[in-house]
Amino acid sequence: MGKFDGVLLASDFDNTLLYTEDALRGGGPVPPLLARNREALEYFMAQGGRFAIATGRALAAFLRYAKDVPMNAPGVVCNGAAIYDFQKEEYLETAMLDAAARERGQTVLDRFPSVAVEAYHIENVIHVVHPNHISRQHEHITHAALTEAPSLLEVPLPLGKLLFEADHEVLEEVLAHLVRQGWAEDYELIFSVSHLLEMTIKGATKGGMVRRLAARLGISMNHVYCAGDEANDLSMLAVAAGGFAPANAAPAVLASGATVVRDAREGAIAEVVEILDRKYAGNTSD
């Protein structure tokens, strides 16, 4: 019996497990996974732990990296719109946007001409309407090609997420517009970073899907731990028995009560495993 039997660790990908911000801003290559993170995760899993990715990325935007990430549990993708089994290559659960989301999203594009939107189709296709420089930065870092459409109304269903892209000040106006329309009652509206506003169906959050994942794995929430750096991670940090934030996390995350660990560039997840190793030191181990 390994010391981490019955323990689930779920981690955000960008700027938590792997620091990608420099590649996003500078246009350079995405760095490899740090050796200390890889070694820590391999140790965690060898001792019976289950490791899962919980990312805001569409599946198509994460698959390129999945083979390089040591993980032995299905992952949360599309910011909580789905659970995907990387071994079986199939979705286990989905929480799709309703048909009205396209029309409502198009009103944003009509009202705010500088805003782009990525629409995440369940079949691994990322559509984009009104692409801007942020869309192209995002395409570079994910290595997932964007399929351009003239209107959201022409993007096929089902969709897991809409991702609005613009300068933060503009997105604050977009958020206010969506709230004024009363649509915040139907959707989760969360900033994943300052220039990205995520829209998923109500209840489709990382926290909600981590709960469902733990239930699927037969793991008590008393032994679920989560790590993340942005506002879209707060829901899973809140439901976890222990939440962790890398030192580079957004101010709201650092102030959330999560345990602050080293910067993602220095192996944040390795430190999380070190902390869990001490916590579960009394467990039986082979």
Image: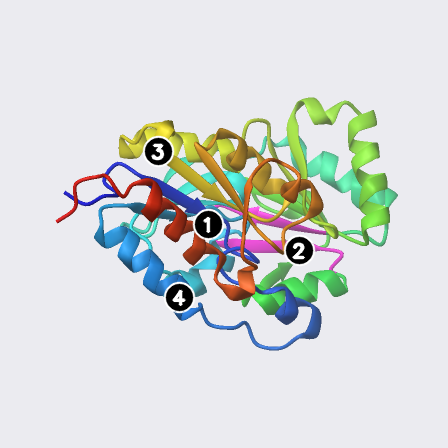
**Image location of residue 264, percent across then percent down:** 54, 60
Which type of secondary structure does the marked residue at label 2 adopt?
A: strand
The magenta stretch spans residue 120: yes
Q: CA distance from mark 3 to mark 4?
A: 23 Å
Res. 158 visible in picture: no
Q: Residue at x 45, y 39 (%)?
A: 82
Residue 165: numbered disc: none
| Tag 1: amino acid | Glu
Residue 92 vs residue 226, the one in the foreground: 226
Mark closer to the chain start, 4 or 2 = 4
Residue position marked by numbered label 2 in the rendering: 128
Q: Identify the mark nearer the N-term, 3 or 4.
A: 4
Assign a secondary structure to mark 3: helix
**Is 108 positioned to the left or the right of 5 in the image?**
right
202 in relation to 264, above or below: above
Please provide the residue range marked out in magenta. 117-131
Q: Position of residue 30 (x, y in %)?
A: 54, 72
The dominant secondary structure in magenta is: strand
In the displayed structure image, the side of residue 187 where residue 167 appears, left or right: right
